[in-house]
Image (spheres, helix red, strand yellow):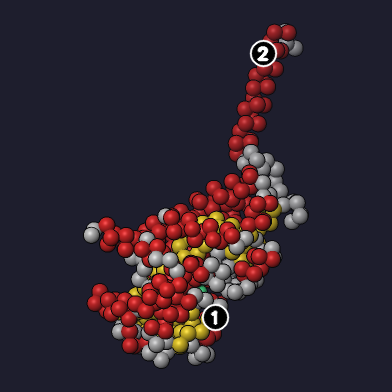
C-alpha cells in the first residue's frame, strides 16, 4: 500500500525508467531499422546481388564481404548484400550487361573493363602515368575524376566510389623481362582496353583478351606465355607457380569503380542510400590500406616461394620501358582531349616548376 503522493512518485520513477530503457534499446539498434528482418522473405527486404571476378582473399573480395556484413548489421538485416566472387555468377564482359538488365545490382570492375563503355577511362591504363596511389587519388578526386564518373552516370550506372589494388607487375614463362626487347614474340593475356593492347603492341607482344578467372588455365595449357597483374591477384590465383619470371615494374595502375545500376539506386529510399553511402565510405578507407598491406604481403610470399626468378626494374631500365612505350601516349592523345594527360599529377608538377 502506498499513500497517494508516494504512488505518484513511484509511477514517475517507473515512467522515467521505461523511457531510459527505450532510448537505450533504440540506441543499440539502428533507429531506422528497429526490427529484425532476418525472418522476412527476399521480396520484403532489399537484396543487392554483388558479383565480382576475383577471389575472396583479395582487397576487392575482402572489402565486398566487409561491406555486406556492415550493411546487414546496420540495417538489422533489412538490406542484404549477397556477394558472388570468382566470376561464379558472371564473368568479365558479362557482369556489366547483367547489371544493366537488373539481374544483379552491384559490381566492381577494374577501370580497364569500363573502357568499352566509356573509353576515356583508358587514361588509367597509361603506363607509368601514376607514381603511387596518392597520385591516383589526387587525379580521381580532381576535375578529371569527376568527369569520368559523370560519364558512367550517363550510361545508367551509379558509381559509389573507387577501390584500390595498387600496381601491376609482369610475369612470363620466358624471360627475364628486363629490356623492352625481351617481350618480343610473346603472347600475353590482357584486359579489354585499347591502351593496354597498345602497350603490349609497343613491346611486340601478341595480346588476347580473356576473363580473369581463365588466366590460370590459359597459362597452364600454354595458350598464353604471360600476363600482368598485382601481387594480390597473382597470389590469389597461384599464377606465379606457373611462371618462371616476374619483373617488379609497377608500370600500370589497377583500381575498381564500384557501381550500382542507376535505376536501382534511384529506387532506394534516402535512408537506405545514406546507410549504403556512409558504410561504403568507411569500407573504402579500410580497403585502400588493406590493398597496400596485402600487396606487400603477397610480394613477400612470392619472394619466399623460391619458385620464380624476380627482377626489380632499375631507374635506367624503367626509362627504357618508358621510351619504348611513348607510342601509347601518342595514340591516346590522337583519340582524347589533351587535359587527360596534362592533368596527371606528374605533368602538373612539371608544369608548375617551369
Ligand atoms: C584482371 O582481370 O586482371 C583484374 O582486373 C581482375 C580484378 O578484378 O582485379
Q: CA distance from mark 1 to mark 2?
A: 76 Å
Residue 212 point in image, percent of width and height: 53, 76
Front-most of residues 258 and 43: 258
User: Split into 4 quadrants, where in the image is the N terminus?
Assistant: top right
Give SS at disc 2. helix
Residue 4 point in image, percent of width and height: 73, 8
Number of numbered labels in the structure image: 2
Task: Confirm if mark 2 falls within 8 A of ligand 1.
Answer: no
Residue 254 visible in the shown view: no
Residue denoted by label 2: 9
**Crowding at mark 2 (Cα within 10 Å: few <14, some 14-19, many 20+):** few
Q: Residue at x 24, y 58 (%)?
A: 353
Q: Nearer the viewer, mark 1 or mark 2?
A: 1
On the rendered structure, is 113 left or right of 226?
A: right
Front-most of residues 152 and 36: 152
- The answer to whether 172 is drawn above or below residue 212 in the figure is below
Residue 185 point in image, percent of width and height: 41, 91
Residue 338 visible in the shown view: yes
Residue denoted by label 1: 210
Amino acid at each position: 500500500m502506498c499513500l497517494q503522493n508516494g504512488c505518484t512518485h513511484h509511477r514517475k520513477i517507473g515512467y522515467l525508467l521505461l523511457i531510459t530503457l527505450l532510448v537505450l534499446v533504440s540506441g543499440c539498434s539502428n533507429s531506422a531499422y528497429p526490427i529484425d528482418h532476418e525472418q522476412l522473405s527476399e521480396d520484403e527486404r532489399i537484396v543487392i546481388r554483388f558479383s565480382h571476378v576475383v577471389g575472396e582473399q583479395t582487397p576487392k573480395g575482402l572489402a565486398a564481404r566487409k561491406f555486406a556484413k556492415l550493411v546487414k548489421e546496420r540495417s538489422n538485416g533489412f538490406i542484404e548484400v549477397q556477394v558472388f566472387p570468382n566470376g561464379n555468377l558472371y564473368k568479365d564482359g558479362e557482369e556489366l550487361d547483367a547489371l544493366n538488365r537488373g539481374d544483379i545490382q552491384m559490381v566492381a570492375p577494374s577501370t580497364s573493363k569500363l573502357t568499352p563503355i566509356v573509353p576515356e577511362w583508358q587514361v588509367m591504363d597509361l603506363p607509368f602515368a601514376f607514381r603511387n596511389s596518392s597520385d591516383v587519388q589526387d587525379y580521381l578526386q580532381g576535375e578529371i575524376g569527376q568527369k569520368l564518373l559523370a560519364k558512367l552516370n550517363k550510361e545508367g550506372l551509379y558509381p559509389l566510389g573507387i577501390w584500390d589494388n595498387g600496381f601491376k607487375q609482369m610475369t612470363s614463362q620466358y624471360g627475364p623481362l628486363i629490356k623492352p626487347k625481351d617481350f618480343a614474340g610473346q603472347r600475353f593475356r590482357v584486359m579489354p582496353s585499347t591502351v593496354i593492347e597498345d602497350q603490349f603492341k609497343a613491346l611486340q607482344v601478341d595480346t588476347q583478351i580473356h576473363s580473369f578467372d581463365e588466366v590460370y588455365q590459359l597459362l597452364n595449357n600454354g595458350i598464353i606465355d604471360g600476363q600482368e597483374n598485382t601481387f594480390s591477384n597473382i597470389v590469389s590465383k597461384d599464377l606465379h607457380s606457373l611462371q618462371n619470371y616476374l619483373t617488379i615494374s609497377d608500370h600500370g595502375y589497377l583500381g575498381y569503380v564500384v557501381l550500382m545500376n542507376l535505376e536501382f539506386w534511384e529506387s532506394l529510399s534516402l535512408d537506405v542510400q545514406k546507410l549504403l553511402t556512409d558504410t561504403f565510405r568507411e569500407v573504402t578507407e579500410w580497403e585502400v590500406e588493406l590493398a597496400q598491406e596485402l600487396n606487400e604481403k603477397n610480394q613477400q610470399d612470392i619472394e619466399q616461394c623460391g619458385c620464380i626468378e624476380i627482377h626489380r626494374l632499375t631507374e635506367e631500365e624503367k626509362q627504357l620501358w618508358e621510351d619504348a612505350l611513348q607510342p601509347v601516349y601518342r595514340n591516346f592523345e590522337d583519340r582524347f582531349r589533351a587535359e587527360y594527360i596534362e592533368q596527371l599529377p606528374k605533368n602538373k608538377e612539371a608544369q608548375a616548376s617551369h
